Amino acid sequence: MLLATLAAGGQAQNEVAIRRNQVGCYPQQEKVIVVEGMNPSGKIKLTLPDGKVKKPKVTRKATSPWSGKQRYIIDLGQLNTPGDYHLSVGTEQCDLHVAERPYHDIAKASLRLFYLIRSGVAIDQGGAYNRPLGHADTHVMIHNSAASELRKAGTVISSPFGWYDAGDYNKYVVNSAFSIGLMFSAYERQKDYFDHLQTDIPESDNHTPDFLDEMMFNLKWFLTMQDPFDGGVYHKLTTPNFEGFVMPTDCHQPRYVVAKSVTATLDFAAVMADAARLYEPYQQDYPGFSAQAAAMAERAYQWAKEHPNAFYRQEQLKDPSVSTGTYGDGHAGDEFFWAASALYRLTHKPFYLEEARRYQPQRFSVPSWGGVASLGAFEWLNDPQMDALRQPMLQQMMAYCDDAIKGVETSSFQSPFGNKPNDFGWGCLAEKCCCQALVLLMADQLNGNTKYQRYAFQNADYLLGRNATGYCYVTGFGDKSPMHPHHRISAADKVEAPFPGMLVGGPNPGQQDKGSGNLTYPSNHPDESYLDMNESYASNEIAINWNASLVAFLCWLDALTAIEH
Ligand code: 9MR
Ligand code: 9MR
């Protein structure tokens, strides 16, 4: 009988569960746990590292707006001594780790993941995850949608390296540029931290920080994605259809670069402009790169001005038709803003300032692959010399932050993320949870205070276990984390555990994979609509833009103490 009521997550409907951050907390961080399945009043026992026992009280109750589940929020108060704290409620038990640098390992793993998903090289510093070279991409065809006078359809180009996009093996400029742009934004604000972060990659012994070396692995691929004859940038490098769940060496479909698009071209321009600035001091390892990137960025912008309506329309592609990821976006205003802002910052040419003014956003929105206005805003906020649009960008961001933290005190999991139905959807843990927290942390730094820090930590708590499913949503960390992400290499290699440090997309009531995967989700409630199965690409895929937000967020949290100590 009991078995029949078990949900897919292994938890019966009314079973008692303690939801808490499974990775760890700083001594000075707020420590909240959530209990569901029973009223734990008088039954909570907290054993301190020195063996003393406390009986914490329920702080408040909350009812889920979706499942109606009653939850009990318990603020454990000051736990300032690092060590393992033991919690029990009836027969339910768990630990809470308090440490000086609780996020160091997970932050590092989130960045190192990019090494593990490099394409076009053998992976030989990946331990159990080593693998031979696949997808050399030295024989890539110009698809007829991408043909130009001097590069006819069928022309073969070489377009190696770069990271695989996600669970699939294609390389998409829009998403790649967004990922680098987002990580650059965090890098610029925590430079000292990132410049010293060691990730044990083949370039670790050179003169460039590992972080920039990793970004460069993808930028080397970017150098091949611009048509040298007109400056337009191919939307993506792809097979006609998604490959099966096989290793890279078992993939045999032809690879194409397809149609140039205005969005890919502008995202490319923005990232290349940023890169031209950031790699300037590293001529020894990357001679000539800065000048080349700057020139490519300006040409790309020019092409976009001449083709403002060149949106990517996959349904128009024929011979062969293409069915892989679209990263389609019919609005390029935000991409114009980001690229113009980045180019103004690089060149100081009045033309780009005029352009940035023309496309400046009216309100702040968190960064996402299809909404990059905030990356443009960061160009103004991250550089003391960029004052023309600084004030409006800052005001818009503050208004966003003040709005984001409303409702925490009545929320089910004591966090700004996770209370509105549209907090959940494809990739929400990155786009809504991590990115929101990153913005809150940035706002604090810009204002020289710690007004929002507490709320950013709350999103970390949500992400790492204090949530409706009880998953710590980053592979390899916590005591209940995804084991079957929609990630081809993790599924096809012979290693049981998936690559560590991957953030999954997360709960998605859209369940767009239900039909094709013949899947049964354990729940339709927005915050419980998650399935740890290989087939679930709508809730359990991984992707570079998502991991980019994890890197930006968790490295920032880790930097908080790296700098203090
Ligand atoms: O593996 C694909 C994943 O990377 C995409 O995000 C997803 C949506 O475009 O599609 C996945 O591929 C599936 C395809 O769309 C439908 N047939 C099953 C494929 C998964 O094996
Ligand atoms: O992240 C993308 C998400 O916002 C879209 O809703 C979804 C469907 O179009 O596609 C996601 O991106 C996928 C891409 O198209 C192909 N590689 C895997 C990406 C993550 O699922």
Image: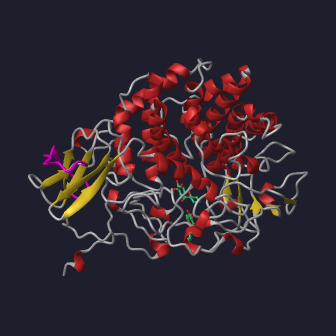
Task: Give the residue at x 57% y 47%.
Answer: 369
Asked if residue 417 shows in the view, the reply is no
Residue situated in front as seen by the camera: 468 or 420: 468
From the viewer's perspective, is residue 420 above or below residue 9? above
Can you say whether 238 is above or below 432 in the image? below
Q: Is residue 340 magenta?
A: no
Can residue 98 be seen here? The reply is yes
Q: Which image quadrant is residue 334 in?
A: top right
Magenta segment main secondary structure:
loop
Q: Is residue 15 above or below residue 172?
A: below
Query: In which image quadrant can residue 140 be found?
Result: bottom right
Residue that extends furthest to the front in the rendered view of this protein:
50
Q: What span is colored magenta in the figure? A: 49-68
Image quarter hosting the C terminus: top left
Q: Say which of 78 and 379 sits in front.
A: 78
Name the quarter where the N terminus is drawn.
Answer: bottom left
Instruction: Give residue 162's position: percent from left, percent from top.
Output: 70, 54
**Left or right of residue 162, residue 229 in this image:** right
Q: Position of residue 459 (x, y in %)?
A: 37, 44
| Residue beneath the point at 58% across and 52% down | 112
Indicate which quadrant contains ligand 1: bottom right
